Every structure is written in C-alpha cells, then in structure tokens.
Image (spheres, rainbow, N blue to C red):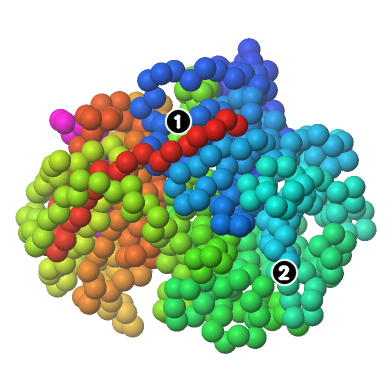
Amino acid sequence: MAISTLNFSLLITIVILLLGQGGVHKIEASHEVYKGYQSLETIPPKFQPYRTGFHFQPPRNWINALAGPMVYKGIYHLFYQYNPNGSVWGNIVWAHATSKDLVNWELQPVALSAAEPNMDINGAWSGSATILPDGKPVILYTGVDSQNQQVQNVAVPKNLSDPYLIEWTKPPQNPIMSPTIQNQINSSSFRDPSTGWLGPDNVWRVVVGSKIGKQGVAILYKSKDFVNWVKDKKPLHSAHGNGMWECPAFYPVSVGNRNSVDTSKSSNDLNVKYVLKVSLDDIKHDYYTVGSYNYHTDVYTPNRGSIQNGFSGLRYDYGKFYASKSFYDGEMNRRVLWGWVNESSSVADDVKKGWSGVMAVPRRVWLDKSGKQLHINPVQEFVKLRMNPVSLRNHVLQPSSLLKVHNITAAQADVEIAFEGLDLSKAEVIDPSWISKPQVLCNQNDSSVRGSLGPFGLKVLASKGMEEYTSVFFRVFKMNTQNNKQHVVLMCSDQSRSSLDKDVDKSNYGAFVNVNPGHEKLSLRTLIDHSIVESFAAKGKSCITSRVYPKLAIDKAAHLYAFNNGLQSVKISSLNAWSMKSAQITGKQ
C-alpha cells in the first residue's frame, strides 16, 4: 500500500482548505487521510489539459499502488488500488482492467471490495498474483480488519474458464497470515505480499513487507498448499536505516540475454541472478539490488558493493515512480514492470479535476551484461501508437543553440535522440563526493547553468515564448582521482520552469548513467503525455519520470526542442520523433 506525498510548501494551504472538511488524520504507517474528501466525488470538468492520452488511468477518482498484474489465457490483467468515491486516498478496493496488448484497456468491475470484518473491512490493500503449476491464478493481498490490523488474505477466481477473471472469492480460511503476540509482527507495518515462488522442495515462499524500528524487513513465509502459511525463523533479507519496506518483489533474471525467467526458476541455474525490490515508505522511492539466492538456506545475498542500507542505491526510476509491481509474461518470455506515478499538484486541485494518479507505461526489464544493474524500457507494443515520423541526422548543435522539432504533436509524443562528437578533453572535473548526490547536483545545475559539456538534450512541453518548458538533459564530467580518470554522465529532468503555476511541485530529478561516452553514443528516449514525462537513458540504464502542469504549453500550444546550453558543440547523430495516438480505455469501473 502506498500513499502520495505532498509538497511541503502546499501543506499550510491544504490544511486551511480542510479545516472545515474534517481535517488531516493519521492512521497506521503514516498514511494521510482527508476525511472530508474521501467520499466527495466530483464531476470532472470538460477541460482536462493534464489527462493523459496513452497512459492508463480510469475516468475519475484516486488510484495508487499496483496490485497483482498478470497474464491469464492471453489476457493481461491490471489490478490497482482505487477509491470509488473520491479523488483522495480512502475507501480502498482492488479495481480491475484487462487488455490484449498492454496499451488499450477495458475497465472491469471491482475485483476485491472491503467487506469482511475479520479480513478487510477497513481496506483491501495491495498484494500480488501467482500462477500455480496447474495454471490457476491466486491473489494474496493485505486487508485491514475491524481492529485496524494489517492481515494477509487469499482470493481465487470464481470461474477459471473466464479469461477476464471478472469474479473473485475469498475462502473462509482467511486471514492466512496475521500479526500475533508470538510472532511479534508490527500490526500496522505488515503488508503487500509478493508473488510466490516454488522451491525444489515443492514448498511455496512469499515475502511480506515490514519493519523493526528503522530496519526494513522482507518477512519470509512458507506453505505447501498456498493456504496454510508458516513464518520462517529469519527474513529473506533486511537492511538498516531505511524504514518500512512496502511492496517487496523478489524474482530471477537471466544472465547474458534479455529473456525473462519464471518466478520459480531454480536458483541452482548459474545463468540466473535475483532481484530484490522494495518500496521505501519513508521517502516514496523504489530501490533494488541484484544478487544470488540459496534455496536451501533461503538466504539472499546482494552483489558485492550493492548499497542497501539507508537511502542510497539503485532505483527503478529516479523520479516519480512508486509501489511498483512486475510479473513474468510467459507468452512473450519477458518480465513486465508497472509503477504508480502520483500527482505533483495540490489535493485541492486533484479534487477540482476529479482524479489523481496515473500508471507509468508498462516496461520490460532485463539484466545488463555486467550483471550489476537492470535495463528498463517501455514494452514494444507502444510503438504501434506512433504516427507522422520526423527524423534528423548528423546535426551539430553549437553552444547556446535551440533546434525546434516541427510537425509533431508535442504534447503527446515519443522522441529518441542520440548524441556523439563530444570533446571529452574539455569535460569538467567532478568532486567524487557528488557521485552519491545526483539530484542535488541537478538542482544546483539546472538547464540554465552552462557547463563545458552540457547541458544538452530536449526541452519538452515548451511554450511559444519559452516561459514554460521541461528540460531533460545530459552533462559529462571527468573524475580526477589517483585511481579513477573516467568520464561520468549525469542525466537530469528539470521541472523548475515547467509551469507558471506556483502551487505545484517543480522538483528536479537526477541520476548518473553507467555509460562510457568515449565509446558509446549518449541515447535518450522520452515519452511526453500532457502532464507526464518519462525518460530513458542508454537503453533504460537510468530512468526518470516527472509530472508537470504547464499553463501555456498545453495541447497544440506545446512545442518540442533539442538544445545545447554547454560551452562546447555536440552532434545529434540521430533524432526520431513521432506524434502518438491515444490508447483506448473503455468500460465502466
């Protein structure tokens, strides 16, 4: 379960707005509740400049964490946390949508409602789906019972012959995992069971997120029948200093190719490594490590050098991307990842527009050839939305230059650009202490700050007079220590000039990209969809997602540019851009 964070600068305004609406109340695990707005369903206005064209979002109301995505009998299933009665968090149920291509969706009836006192009367929260060896799908999910305890429940399809899995039932054995005095589990920090994996001993395993003080914990449970579960004596993994682990995920990845691996793949296979992902509740970011797993001891060991304590390490996405879920798509032999992208606008604005939250485009995940990190890229299906291609080759961007990309629907587009021809001898020296602070570096050096090699990249959702724009760009530095003379590449997403609206969060985001600019082109793919900008550097080695709310650069008034604000020239080896058709979302929730 994941709840959106608020820009602190908006807090006072929001509190004032809510004083007559029931106020702000805290419940378990720091979730913020706006009681006066929980069941205040508004009619969305006709003018909706920030609704997306090809990202998944229902017509109205609040959505957040992914829950149990899967493919069954050729149909993709997206479950997600949903408030059927308002555009703020509350009244949480499992909403459901289905698709044949991961692009176009049909809304289905609510799959799991909050109804049973002993299991989920106060909320049907996030969980995961598992496909059993006989092909039967099973859902494990967190419920909040009548005592406000977080417990784990199981749900099964009512009709296995229905590929759309419209109806689900909750067996009487629920809840199947509960906090007790004996197991000493924190009843307010015990949620989001993972997809199960079957060991060579024919015993199922799942992990559930929790914490002990400030120590994040992936509690391990085992079962022979997927109904009766026993807590293991030790967790699968834990780490100090990063608080509650939400939405834990544990899955294998292939070594040496992009093909995916079934979740129950044997850990004895030398061509397999394992990924442990956790969503850090304290800071609302998804972190992961890559490592090895021993089935016999149930010990997960991250790669040597992996950062796992505190708030540092590898992330799926270095912008707005949280409470993600992935699944093994056996029909396409790939792992598909989804993440929730929350708003950067105020709660008052969300209520006014009648909705909150979108899903990032589904992304394919594979292990880099180094074995140390993942590649994360949009699934191939989205290329079918491309139309009206525009291309450019071998164009030199001089210092302080701006190149407009014409004949493109700039508010809804897909852009691929690659740079080369850098004079690396002119790269600025970077202090090694900044390597762990990319976001701070991007905040202090936004797109207006000129460096030697950079900033260069794209200006998207730009107004005609450049009063508004969002910049996605690279800077190239060099290390100058005794043992390290390498060049390093910084990627930034700069929202500081994205909107004239002073009440939206315009934080900048940053990430270093593991690429050698002396031997590789610097590639960037950016998906632009009205209020969301998703960027992927070096074939998905680093990703940044942002939310922006321009007042001028909307719809046909939005423009797209390539730019170079560095002191040295840079060559665009290729630029390909497409206007994007809208995806179809049909049915009623």
Task: Using the numbered discs, state the Cα–Cα distance from disc 2 to disc 1 in whole angstroms.
Answer: 44 Å
Q: Is residue 289 above or below residue 269?
A: above
Question: Looking at numbered disc 2 in the image, what kind of residue is underneath it?
Answer: Pro
Residue at 56% across, 37% down: 107
User: Marks 1 and 2: in contact by CB < 8 Å?
Assistant: no
Residue 269: image location, x then y, percent? 60, 85
Disc ID at residue 98: none
Residue 170: image location, x then y, percent? 82, 46
Q: 74 or 443: nearer the eye? A: 74
For the record, the magenta segment spans: 460-474
| Residue 187 forms part of the magenta stretch | no
Residue at 63% across, 69% down: 263
Residue 450 left/right relative to 242: left
Which image quarter is the N terminus in?
top right
Badge 1 is on which residue? 345
Q: Is residue 367 visible?
A: no
Residue at 67% across, 73% down: 264
Residue 483: image location, x then y, percent? 33, 83
Residue at 70% across, 52% down: 161
Residue 311 left/right relative to 22: left
Q: Is residue 490 visible?
A: yes
Considering the numbered disc 2 on the image, is that residue within a helix, a strand or a loop?
loop
Residue 221: image location, x then y, percent? 80, 65
Name which quarter of the figure residue 467 lies in.
Answer: top left
Which image quarter is the C terminus in?
top right
Q: Residue furthest front?
A: 161
Tell me if mark 2 has few (under 14), some (14-19) or many (20+) residues whose alpha carbon lies within 10 angstroms of its own: few
Badge 2 is on which residue? 133
Question: Looking at numbered disc 1 in the image, what kind of residue is underneath it?
Answer: Ser
Q: Is residue 483 above or below residue 529?
A: below
